[in-house]
Amino acid sequence: MDNEHGEFLTEAEKDLMGGIDTSVPHSARIWNYWLGGKDNFAVDQEAGDEYARLFPGIFDLAKAERAFLGRAVRYLVTEAGVQQLLDVGTGLPTEDNTHQVAQSLASECRVVYVDNDPLVLAHARALLVGTPEGATHYIDADMRAPERIIAEAAKILDFSQPVGLLFMGVLGHITDYDEARSIVRRLMDVLPSGSYLALNDGTNTNPALNEAQQGYDDTGAVPYLLRTPEEIEGFFEDLEPVEPGIVPLPEWRPDLGHIGAENVDGVGGVARKP
Ligand SMILES: C[S@@+](CC[C@H](N)C(=O)[O-])C[C@H]1O[C@@H](n2cnc3c(N)ncnc32)[C@H](O)[C@@H]1O
């Protein structure tokens, strides 16, 4: 095995890299690259640059999705009074991570992250340190196994109290719509009334973006399906969307923080379980 510079790795480096495949691009690492982070490899940068060549707006979309996450968490903690968050598809630590936003507003917030990427796992151990009053926990799990996520999360979260469930730019990884809806539903089902779903995703509303996404899917990375705004709205079935509904990302409560970028092909919203 060698690294992205073509250099051979020492035994110790190989141990550190356990499970981390630098030969194919990974979603969490490319996302980190688009967000301006350093936790990515040459293969991710190449895939990220090729995507941006076809669709330069990807940097803005990543920023707008991340900014939406921050505003949604602020809404949940300050307006909805939620103090427990379950963030599925965490990504690599960056600025304004969910637990940092939540615990800066209410230090007792309990945050559980879920991701299945080995590099996210490695960083989570080192970086996701929360406030002493609250709790920050990481589950290494595939979202296709919601029952496992529930069992693990129940060690940290009290499921008799409202929980904010977050799917931020992740459900496109579940390309079967029924399966993706079932994952959201099975997690929402165990949460009490007064819980919330906060979700955003890129949309298939721009031919250049669709073309770039096709190229990405051909790299060997786990494919990502861009959906219509209506399909994304369908994830909120049986829930009560809070104002202004499921809308283009910059239009969702810009009063709560920065919007990252204007005019992006992505929608998001927050909805309450009745
Ligand atoms: C585009 S990133 C979004 C990261 C973060 N939510 C954000 O908004 O910045 C998608 C994340 O989903 C994770 N992911 C992909 N498939 C997954 C799966 N089956 N189960 C859990 N996480 C998954 C990836 O590892 C990656 O961290």
Image (cartoon, rainbow, N blue to C red):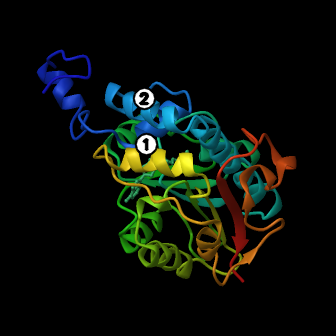
Task: Classify residue 45 by image quadrant.
Answer: top left
Q: Describe residue 156's horizontal placement relative to residue 104 as left or right.
A: left
Q: Can residue 207 be seen in this snapshot?
A: yes
Q: Mark 2 falls on what kind of element?
A: loop
Give the residue type at disc 2.
Asp
- Above or below, 233 relative to 133: below
- Above or below, 110 relative to 122: below
Q: Describe residue 171's horizontal placement relative to residue 218 as left or right.
A: right
Q: Residue 76 got which mark?
A: none
Give the residue type at disc 1.
Ala
Q: Describe residue 61's horizontal placement relative to residue 142 as left or right.
A: right
Q: Can residue 40 be seen in this snapshot?
A: no
Residue located beneath label 1 in the image? 28
Is the CB–ligand 1 distance for label 1 below 8 Å? yes
- Above or below, 69 relative to 51: below
Q: How far across and down, in percent of the image, does residue 233 sit? A: 65, 72
Task: Classify residue 230 by image quadrant.
Answer: bottom right
Q: How far across and down, in percent of the image, does residue 95 sit? A: 61, 33
Could you tell me which residue is drawn at 78 percent across and 56 percent down? Answer: 75
* Sooner in the amino-acid sequence: mark 1 or mark 2: 1
* Mark pair 1, 2: CA separation: 9 Å
Q: How far across and down, in percent of the image, does residue 192 sit? A: 63, 80
Q: How far across and down, in percent of the image, does residue 254 sit? A: 83, 48
